[in-house]
Image (spheres, grey):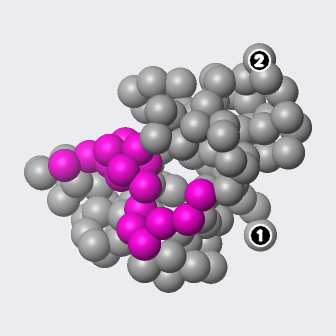
């Protein structure tokens, strides 16, 4: 299982986990979920429930990934399989993302 921390505007909002390439979970942190002033991470992950499950990487997070030649170059330089969306997200979404959300690998 691999897990990353999800931040919105520098505030820890939740954790995204990959059990395998067919089972993903996004869970809001307790304090973030309980605070009505904190917005949802995305429109597709509203704060109507604390945990979401999916059979594929959630579209919101998938859309943070590069495409085409940039993706191929990132995968080659970082030595990541091009089919490893979660690994690429963990390696590239910590800085300079479009929008308020960043991804940080959790320290083991």
Does the image show residue 37? yes
Question: Does 75 appear above or below 70?
Answer: below
Residue 107 painted magenta: no
Label 1 sits on a secondary structure element that is: loop
Q: Position of residue 76 (x, y in %)?
A: 26, 65
Label number found at residue 37: 2
Q: Position of residue 68 (x, y in %)?
A: 12, 51
Label 2 sits on a secondary structure element that is: loop
Label number found at residue 60: none
Question: Does 43 appear above or below 87?
Answer: above
- Location of the C terminus (image quadrant): bottom right
- Residue at point 50%, 76% (across, down): 23
Left/right of residue 98 with respect to residue 23 in the rendered view: left
- Residue 48 is drawn in which quadrant? top right
Left/right of residue 74 with respect to residue 9 in the rendered view: left
- Residue 57 is drawn in which quadrant? bottom left
* Crowd around label 1: few <14 · some 14–19 · many ≥20 (10 Å): few
Label number found at residue 108: 1
- Residue at point 63%, 44% (across, down): 6
Question: Does 106 appear above or below 49?
Answer: below
Question: Which span of residues is magenta-colored?
Answer: 52-67
Query: Total number of numbered labels?
Result: 2
Give 56 or 4, whichever is nearer the viewer. 56
């Amino acid at each position: 299982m691999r897990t990353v921390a999800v931040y919105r505007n520098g505030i820890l909002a939740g954790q995204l986990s990959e059990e395998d390439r067919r089972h993903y979970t996004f869970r809001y942190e307790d304090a973030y979920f309980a605070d009505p002033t904190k917005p949802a991470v995305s429109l597709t992950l509203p704060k109507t429930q604390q945990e979401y499950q999916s059979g594929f990487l959630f579209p919101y997070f998938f859309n943070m990934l590069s495409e085409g030649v940039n993706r191929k170059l990132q995968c080659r330089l970082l030595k990541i399989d091009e089919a490893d969306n979660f690994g690429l997200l963990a390696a590239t979404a910590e800085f300079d993302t479009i929008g308020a959300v960043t991804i940080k690998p959790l320290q083991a």
